[in-house]
Amino acid sequence: MVTSNVRPQTFSALQDLDLRGAALDHASLKAVLPRPELNFATAAEAVESIIRRVRTDGFSALSELAEQFDGVQQDHTRVPADAMERALAELDPGVRAGLEESIARARVFAAAQVPGETRVEYGAGATVTQRWVPVRRVGLYVPGGLAVYPSSVIMNAVPALAAGVGSLAIASPPQKEFGGLPHPVILAAAQLLGVGEVHAIGGAQAIAAFAYGVPAGAGMDPALAIEPVDVVTGPGNLFVATAKRLVKGVVGIDAEAGPTEIAILADATANPAFIAADMVSQAEHDPNAAAVLVTDSPELAEAVREALENQCAATKHSERVRIALGGNQSAIILVDDVAAGIAVCNVYAAEHLEVHTADAAADAAGITAAGAVFVGPNAPVSLGDYCAGSNHVLPTSGTAAFASGLNVNTFLKAIQVIDYDRAALAAVAPHVIALANAEDLPAHGDAVAIRFP
């Protein structure tokens, strides 16, 4: 039997979900596990309107939307080169060192992901090759709402550069306090990476501009135009995710990312203060962020709850954390044992999954659905956000069951090359003709037969 004890919607009343003794199959587990309440249908109407405006009115629409949503006035969106240079020159040395270390580690991991060519010979004169080719141009979205994300500049740009993409553009919301430009740390990160094309555009309008392009207006420098891209990547809010959903097919996308989430699988050996800190760290992203603890130890659960009270009171974004951890998307889930916890985690398919158990490495090996798995007490999600070398743009809302985090392959396409000579074709011609006739497509067989009069 599944029991749920939902206390008043405050952080200290993180809900309990007791699955002990429950024999739940995959579908039943999916139905009871906590998720954020997202309404794509409500957002779709507004986003469709924004996309139509951008396609029809170009920079005029972008200017109106920037004033409406960001409170800034702009004639165009391109960030001047001198602003990029100034942002890097004025960057705090400690922040610059952190960005440089993050870039260096991300580059090593991305370079190792680049796939090699595959070539198969079926006999003399019969080869099939698969080669990987980068997409022509990508648009990278970097959020700028409740927080500043220079790390997302790195996570988006580094694998695209490793893939060999020749044209990269970044969009990030204009900030009134910075003269209508994106946050200077975002500009500095782009400058460090050598990405010179940055646009001050936020939200769904940025996705529309990348997908369809924005031509230069009358009397405008043609260099200020936004050329359409082939792939759009990067996290964002509900409106950004909805826009990516609506333009998928016009362009490729990485994922329809929802609010961030952390799941933690822990047993009685875990440190409750560590677990609480990691839950708070994700909850500070967004009031809709999810934090889920899966444990077979009621004692650990109560110790974590106590640690959360203390840490929430001390953290800067306490109110945001309280809302997130008090929401329907967050919970402490009690299970019979670690094996049951692994099963729950595989159904939940978390964006970030931490494993704090006595045999963390072995238990982590049992995870088959997660964006990223963090093994043991010394691998918090924060490490992956910045300096592990991994990528923090990961599938959310259970999509890790079938989707992958951002990586070099996001920016590559596989092209198959078939190279047969006449003798090699002759060897399989009877099979091609037989199969073509079986499918009632005789012209397919004729296209082979005509080569052997």
Image (cartoon, rainbow, N blue to C red):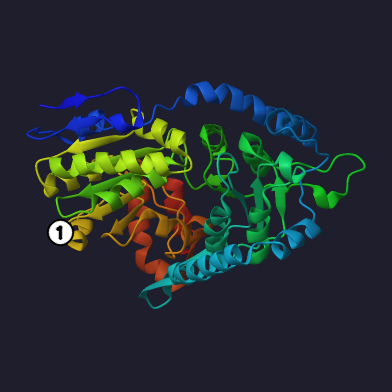
Please tell me which residue is depicted at 67% across the width and 60% down the height of the picture: 188
284 relative to 431, above or below: above
- Circle 1 residues within 10 Å: few <14, some 14–19, many ≥20: some
- 39, 131: nearer the viewer: 39
In the rendered image, residue 319, in percent from the top left (x then y), is placed at 45, 33
Q: Quadrant of residue 167?
A: bottom right
Left or right relative to 312: residue 139: right
> Which residue is labeled 1 in the image?
358
Q: Quadrant of the N terminus?
A: top left
| Mark count | 1
Query: Which amino acid, by three-letter code, is at mark 1?
Result: Ala
Q: Quadrant of residue 425?
A: bottom left
- 401, 195: nearer the viewer: 195
Q: Secondary structure at mark 1?
A: loop
Please tell me which residue is depicted at 63% across the width and 57% down the height of the picture: 136
In the rendered image, residue 382, in percent from the top left (x then y), is placed at 41, 55
In the rendered image, residue 176, in percent from the top left (x then y), is placed at 73, 39
